Amino acid sequence: MAVFNEDTRVKIPATIQFMRNGYNYQSLKDIDLHNETRIAMNRFIPAISKLNGKQYTQAEALAIVEEIHTVIKNNDLGKSFYQWLINPQDKPQLVDFEHPYENDFAIVDELTFGKDGTENEKTGSFRPDITVLINGIPLAFLEVKHPNNEGGIQAEFNRMLNKRLEKPEYKKYFNMLQVVSFSNNMEYESDDDTAFAEDVKAGSFYTTPNGQKTSFSFFREEQPKTSGFVNISLDRVKAVLKDNHYSPSEADTEEFQTNLDMNTPCNRFVTSLFDKERILYYIRYGMTYVNNTVPEKHIMRYPQFFASKALLKKLDNGGKSGIIWHTQGSGKTALAAMSTRILRDYYAGQGITARFYYVVDRLDLLTQVSSEMAKRGLNVINVTNKAEFEKELNKPISNHISMGTDGEITVVNIQKFDDEMPVSKNDYGAKIQRVIWVDEAHRSYKSDGEFFKNLMLVDPDAVYVALTGTPLLSKKERSNLKFGDYIHKYFYDKSIADGYTLRIKKESIETTARADIKKNLELENPKANKSDVYESEDYIQALCKFIEKDFSYFRLTNGDDTIGGMIVCASNPQAKKIKRWFDEQSKLVAGLVISDEEIPSAVNKKTQIAFKETLKPDILVVHQMLTTGYDVNRLKKMYLLRNAKEHTLLQTISRVNRPYKSPVGKVYQYGYIVDFVDIEEEYDRTIEMYLKEIEEDFPDDGEDGGSLTGLIIGPDDINAKYKKYVNELDSMIDTANLERFSKQLTFMNKDALLTIRRLLNGIKTCHTEFKLSRAEEYAAQIDIEHIRKLLKAVQARIDFVNLSSNPTNLLTIISNKEVVDILYEFLKTKIEIMDLGKLIDAMKGVANTQEYKELTDLVTKVQDEIKRNRNHNQIEMVKLDEVLQKLFGKLDIANMAEINDELRKILEEAHRINAENERISARYDGNYAFVKTYTDAVEIHSEYDKEDIEKVMDIVYGAVKEIKTANILILQGRDNFVSSVKSMTVTKLIKAKLYGKLGLKNWYSELLNEAYANMKMF
């Protein structure tokens, strides 16, 4: 019978896919692990000897590994180790990034990190499914789940954040690991409207360890690999299965062959991310340490990866300029920062020195960009006048770079140069390549204007890379006519789907507060000038009252006082009056940031930083400043009073589209805008222009070209989503009667239950959005208390399905009370009663019976025994799990007495298994390594008497005890351990007549190898 579980469906096929990509398979049976780092010494020593042109002895290699261990224990997110990895200087080279195929790539399944031999986070260990070893060093891992797993891929994210990254004892491992990834072998959810930001369930994701700020990225392939795969024979596949304790015959089953296909979602992801050249590129260039208030480590997002590769391809083909069109919030500044290292090395390989310049067109952007670049490890030079720029422009080599920086970049405010800019020159024949990044290429650079002409004449041989999220599209001022073709594009539909930005929910003032404002606004002259109206004291009074009330309600409804707001004013005078009103009449703290002679730039800067890094002010009041380039995740609501046009409109509203998770765990699905100026017509016109641009410049992109619809939504869109949820739910189950609903759930499989839960959660979220929009008519459609009760019922059923399908695993992680609650809710659905209103009383009667009390008592005792067991893969525990599955599958009120009889037998068996393991453990002084070695040997060699195998283990353990330096022997390697123990035991085994009787000649070395591996783990 075929085994159909996570290992056979995902893990082992993914292991084979790594091998197809040229990775070697490393068995735990013959790995020599350094205990504290989990570095595979048997791979590390030959690899670094090859890279460094020197044959290291065991002692010399051990000294290097001990130094690595010291470095990864630093409290620096692994920065010291990473610097050694990519730039060893006077240390031994650990990885050859210049010649990827000179490195040793291997994968090992179920490698334990920590002090225990099993996945047991309570006792300080974790065990990824597949660990990637590069030159023997664990630098990445892949965790897998079967499709439609409970909690989806989010369950793995939560485990990573809450059970691994928060533990101090794991810190050193995550300082060493550069890339961690997750897959449940499913396609990404294509229906974005049903995939809430906090509820992503399907797909494959990657990240780099970044403490509690770790975020997870999609990988959408743009350049699929079609050749260069290694053919893996069926015999090798069977060997991997056997090494993972499965029958080699599994390889012949249709189910396994289906999952072995190279084009399954997980297998494609393995190829996309872990292709040898790609993974080294990611490690070398894709990691950035960001010096925020709390230091962070970021990893390159996939659109940044493909953009950087496209730029290199452009340069290889002789190109000198182009545009990177990435939507707002997709990390264009970070891309430029990462690319400095990439292009520095690219030109250094040609004997050319690269110099980098970043051009902005506003003082506030110079401040923002300089700060972001400096945080990312670059030495930043701000140019304040033409003479300084000329000086920096013509330096062949920088004298500003200091130790600890990743290079240098000069940030230039083009507005500083009213006359022509300086022209570069290369004195003394210096080979210099200037790379000029042009920020926000949709502004300030008119083709017939001085700024554009001056910029392009600075250096005719320079590389110009224009960055924009909203290119100019008018016939006169198309961006790509000025800066060249598009190098790479990444539209906001993909950015939203990838979770880098959010949709924007528009709340029209007509449906919220226009009537209130008009009621409080009495104009003597209805034909007055607009500024007279919108800057009048009556208007300011009515407007500010509304904003104060609305923003306070927004915070209250979300239960979150950390979210901030922004008021985008029509003029500076209006902004000043609004600020004054909040100062004088509101408890909310407002911060004013405008370009005004009365407000020093230092004050503006202080307010910007305070809003970004603290929770005050509550709300920003701006005119034109901060409506582009100012990214603050907690900024979630905008009050739009200024009528912006085209690209300026998209830039402005995008200030609220950054993802945000509050300190209490609230995850936002939208950014919110209250629209006082009716942007819909201008928005539609702008989108139409962009669609035309796409059609003209990317005619062959087909479905992958991107979409520009649906960025802004309103209550009507939420209502359409709600109707969709209801229709789908009604087609599956009757939700009108709670008890009937609960009974119907018992006939549904787990996939259907998960779908019902997702739809109910969707309806619940729609209700919240209606309330936030003050769309009370829409909100009244939903009986939210009834929805909560339905959710509780479906969750209870899911819990029981989990209990009956995977009992030992679930019983290990939940409490006694939780398992009793699951049984109670399940048995409630089994009561047959005509008057459903009397169900609760009927269930109370059942709960008071002796049979029910015995049932719950026996289940909790079985649970306690299961938790005592340290090896759930032990064959006897696997059989026990199968018995429990059948037992829970037939549980009913009518047969509780029969169930209790069977539970007593299960309890006796579980107690017997644990007692036997503890007896053996006591025999070996509590050393569980020998318990596992013995139980595995009994399982594998069932043809021999287990008492004889026990005698063999006694002799082996006696020899190990005699070796006082056993721990040193383990560090010196498997071969030394095996040969030393053999020399001390073979004669004794022969005299005891065990060597020939058990045929130890054929498997004694294998037994000692197992003992060695288990001693390393335990």
Image (cartoon, rainbow, N blue to C red):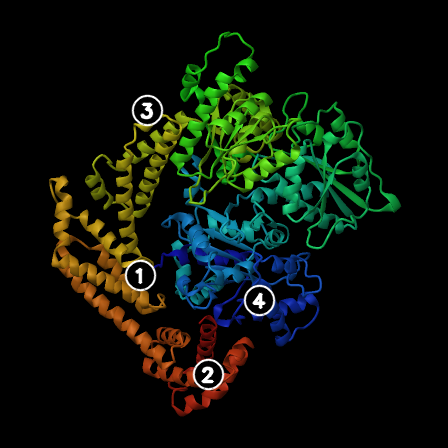
Tell me whether the residue at label 2 lies in contact with that at label 3, contact meaning CB atoms closer than 8 angstroms: no
Give the side of residue 71 with respect to residue 240, left or right.
right
Residue bearing the label numbered 3? 777
Q: Tag 1 or tag 2, which sits nearer the N-term? A: 1
Identified by mark 3, the residue type is Glu
* Circle 2 residues within 10 Å: few <14, some 14–19, many ≥20: some
Tell me: residue 412, above or below residue 145: above
Q: Tag 3 or tag 2, which sits nearer the N-term? A: 3
Camera-side residue: 72 or 551?
Answer: 551
C-alpha separation, residue under disc 1 versus residue under disc 4: 36 Å
Count of numbered marks: 4
Residue bearing the label numbered 1? 808
Residue 324's spot in the image, x, y percent?
64, 36
Which dot, 2 or 4, sits closer to the camera? 4
Q: Tag 4 or tag 2, which sits nearer the N-term? A: 4
Tell me whether the residue at label 1 lies in contact with that at label 4, contact meaning CB atoms closer than 8 angstroms: no
Q: Which mark is residue 69?
A: 4
- Badge 4 marks a residue whose secondary structure is helix
Which dot, 2 or 3, sits closer to the camera? 3
Tell me whether the residue at label 3 lies in contact with that at label 1, contact meaning CB atoms closer than 8 angstroms: no
Identified by mark 4, the residue type is His
Identified by mark 2, the residue type is Val
C-alpha separation, residue under disc 2 versus residue under disc 3: 77 Å
- Badge 3 marks a residue whose secondary structure is helix
Tell me: residue 621, above or below residue 317: above
Query: On the rendered image, what quadrant is the N terminus found in?
Result: bottom left
Residue bearing the label numbered 2? 960
Identified by mark 1, the residue type is Thr
Residue 954's spot in the image, x, y percent?
39, 84
* Circle 1 residues within 10 Å: few <14, some 14–19, many ≥20: many
Residue 952's spot in the image, x, y percent?
39, 84
Residue occupying the point 63% across, 53% down: 284
